[in-house]
Image (cartoon, rainbow, N blue to C red):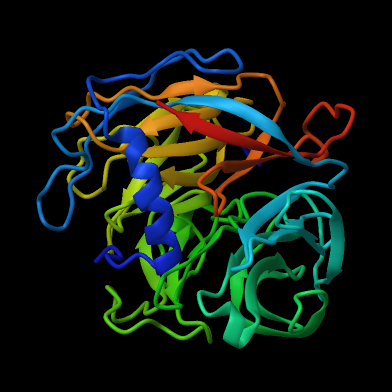
Amino acid sequence: MDRRPAAWTRPSARLAAVLAITVVLASACSGVGGKAPGTGTATGTTSSAVPPTSTGETAASTRATALPAVTVAGTIATGLTTPWGLGFLPDGTALVTERDTAKLKAIAATGHGVRTVGTVAGVVPGGEGGLLGLAVSPTFWTDHTVFVYYTAGHDNRVAAITLDEGATRIVGQRDILTGIPAAQFHDGGRLLAAPDGTLFVGTGDATVSSRAQDLGSLGGKILHITADGAPVPGHPFADAPLVYSYGHRNVQGLAFDANGRLWASEFGANAYDELNLIRPGGNYGWPEVEGPSDDPRYVAPYKYWPTSEASPSGLAVLGETAAMAALRGERLWLIPLSGPAGETTPIAQLTGAYGRLRTVTVAPDSSLWLATSNTDGRGTVRPGDDRIVRLTLSQ
């Protein structure tokens, strides 16, 4: 629901290639802030706080960053039903999950032609639940595996989906993690594959806020699991081996930056939404804290927004810039991840241009693919919705 009711350090070869190209966008840094948007009505600033890290370094470097401008380069797909997860196979084919139909769809590398790969079994759509996040195995061409996060009714689950050799149909499905709390709202759902094949899983508190502080619950957490759903060696909590960080309300965005740091976007309740720099073992405060805090028990957000301006879901990072899709805010936030700590200013792009924005993902050509969410029961449906548009960023 929009409102009420040691970080990885070795990017994969493909991710490293993308980042090597896109870091050029930040190489001409000359000051804080950024250019006016190429499209839309980009306005707005945010407050910020600097989270402590396990090594004592600040959350941002000391070099200021100029934000790139966004250009809409075209429409990739239309007529989708509540697209949620989005990822790319090694050959450039995109896979998309539809929350309410439980269908896994594919878009050709050329960006034209949508086909159905199959329907994920056991999905029980309803409220914010259904077929949600997607992550492609880093070794897809040997294991033909993608991972999905879905609602099974009484709980949320992570499943490994096996595709045939041509990635044309589903040939196998097995749950690797069950027991994540589910409810009509706050189901989390984002997946992120690390280069070593492990998975980060963003969950929600499923409307019971106390779960976020309870290490015995999988709700309100960022989890870290192997491709078989087992604990990752070196986990921060001996008694909660799947938990990477806790004190979260509803995590729906996860991304690595060029330095391998993990970032997460998170829904607030009535005051502030957050972008957090995640550290292993960190407590991010919910429900005791929402937004800024100087309480040393909790990690303060890197950036925070009034809830009317965000309701953040998808998150992607290009070079030194994060792109965060906003649902209620109906805009794409560009956020500098370097510059004087606490002084960088995010810029809103595409405000109101496409309605509710759910997911943003870096494509193999270093563009951004942005999915709308106007058919989710809360948006105003426009002709062609839901859609995926392609964005390019330029300095």
Height in image: 30 above or below 285? above
Residue at image position (60%, 22%) is 350
Q: In this image, 322 relative to 332: left or right? A: left
Image quadrant holding the C terminus, namely top left
Q: How many labels does the image show?
A: 0
Asked if residue 213 shows in the view, the reply is no
Point out the residue furthest to the left here: 56
Q: In this image, 104 relative to 195: left or right? A: right
Asked if residue 346 shows in the view, the reply is yes
In the rendering, at what x and y percent does residue 262 appear?
A: 35, 55
Query: Which of 165 and 336 lies nearest the eye of the viewer?
Result: 165
In the rendering, at what x and y percent does residue 288 appear?
A: 36, 44
Query: Which of 99 and 34 lies nearest the eye of the viewer?
Result: 34
Q: In this image, 368 relative to 258: left or right? A: right
Residue at image position (53%, 59%) is 203
Query: Which of 32 and 365 lies nearest the eye of the viewer?
Result: 365
In the rendering, at what x and y percent does residue 71 appear?
A: 58, 25
Height in image: 345 above or below 100? above
Residue at image position (77%, 49%) is 127
In the rendering, at what x and y percent does residue 274 appear?
A: 42, 37
Residue at image position (37%, 60%) is 16
Image quadrant holding the N terminus, namely top right
